[in-house]
Image: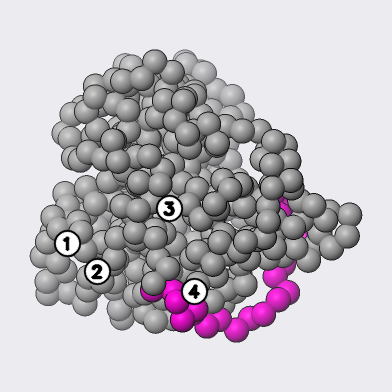
Amino acid sequence: MNLAEQVKRAGVVGAGGGGFPTHVKLAAAADTVIANGAECEPLLHKDAAVMEHQAGAMVQGLQLAMAAVGATAGIVGIKEKNHHAVEAVTAACRGTTVRVHLLGDYYPAGDEYDLVHEATGRLIPPGGIPLQVGAVVCNVETFVNIAAAAAGRPVTHKTLTIAGAVRGPVTLTVPLGTSLRECLEAAGGVTVPDPVLCIGGLMMGETTDQLDRPVIKTTGGVIVLPRTHHVVERKLKPPAVQNAIGKSACDQCRYCTELCPRFLLGYAVEPHQVMRSLAFTATGADRWNEWAAMCCACGLCTLYACPEELFPKEACDQSKAELKKAGRKWSGPTTVRPHPMRDGRRVPIRALMQKLHLLAYEHPAPMSERTVAPRRIVLPLKQSAGSPGRAQVRPGERVDAGQLLGDVPEKTIGAPIHAPFAATVDEVTAAHIVLTRN
């Protein structure tokens, strides 16, 4: 059995948030494999902790991936400020063909278009993927999971950071299906009366007050903030309100575009033009929408650049959805040339945190060996891009740790789900499986 098949059976997906099934990447051909350890969401430390404590397994997984795709170069992108992670990975790379590439402390260094250019000098074609320039990019935790898959161990646990308004910010490894409420308790509990969770980070994550949501394969971290926090108040505004504000107040100043990382890298992303679609939907909406086609949804335009606190990122999200629904793809310029002011316009993480009123929550979240052992877990059958799994077990059935619970249909993209521990199946639906620990 080749590595791609092992990884497929183990249910390995992108652990950085994207959740794309990793076996698809490993079945391709590339000359370079890149481990994305940039981790630029404020307050999250999961990737740095994984590299510091599991550098050997991460480099092993990267080397296995290199062999699978025929690559001769392996690169680990790490922010220079994460000294312990840099030291651990540098040591693990000795005697291999894998090298460390140090990154600056700016946002969004983890965007794969940006990372591929920084690490290799190559520019991905507009609307393209790293494979088109000979690169495979995966999150550092994904490479740890690749190494485990090669040893016959499926993905059953997830490492995530719990930070923000909690008593003891921490990075933990917990069974998939563990409730976020139990993770918050492991961080000492919340310190605000009406907490709101930013799952995956404040910039690009999902904002919710549902504390009983389960941890899934793409949950990289949770930032807890009070409902009264200014950024939370903005994020919780309904889309119709966001659109109405933008339609009435946008004065086309271009700050959203001039600070857009993709625009500065040379791609035709112009959020200020997308904002026009809010006012001119009767004529030319398709044209304005297309300026959002290559937006990476980093959120800088909404949460940092716009002087009027409008919502250009959300307008881009809406435009991309409309383009997808209409089956429209990018038809504009295909030449990419980085902006001459790109280096000077990068946004330092410190400046971003100050703008977001996060400096009061800036505390370390070290890796903890603390055991989180939930008695009951809820495992969604869809935890990645692609098709949801189909249950392979029935209520009342006893299962062992690592046993297959849900599998995806043949000839579809998705990832199977496995039991994190020995348990009894309590409930099976089309959406999830509930287990109770034996």
The answer to whether the residues at label 1 and label 2 have Cβ atoms under 8 Å apart is: yes
Amino acid residing under circle 1: Val
Sooner in the amino-acid sequence: mark 1 or mark 2: 1
Image: 378 above or below 365 = above
Sooner in the amino-acid sequence: mark 2 or mark 3: 3
Q: Quadrant of the C terminus?
A: top left
Residue bearing mark 1: 86
Sooner in the amino-acid sequence: mark 4 or mark 1: 1
Rounded to the nearest angstrom, the CA distance separating label 3 from label 1 is 22 Å
Residue visible at 50% across and 48% down?
303
Within 10 Å of the Cα at label 3, are there few (<14), some (14-19), or many (20+) other Cα atoms?
A: many
Within 10 Å of the Cα at label 1, are there few (<14), some (14-19), or many (20+) other Cα atoms?
A: many
Q: Nearer the viewer, mark 3 or mark 4?
A: 4
Rounded to the nearest angstrom, the CA distance separating label 4 from label 1 is 26 Å
Sooner in the amino-acid sequence: mark 3 or mark 4: 3
Rounded to the nearest angstrom, the CA distance separating label 2 from label 3 is 22 Å
Residue bearing mark 4: 265
In this rendered view, identify the residue nearer to me: 159 or 429. Answer: 159
Residue bearing mark 2: 102
Q: Which residues are magenta?
A: 318-343
Amino acid residing under circle 2: Leu
Q: Nearer the viewer, mark 4 or mark 1?
A: 4
On the rendered structure, is 38 left or right of 318?
Answer: left
Residue bearing mark 3: 14
Within 10 Å of the Cα at label 2, are there few (<14), some (14-19), or many (20+) other Cα atoms?
A: some
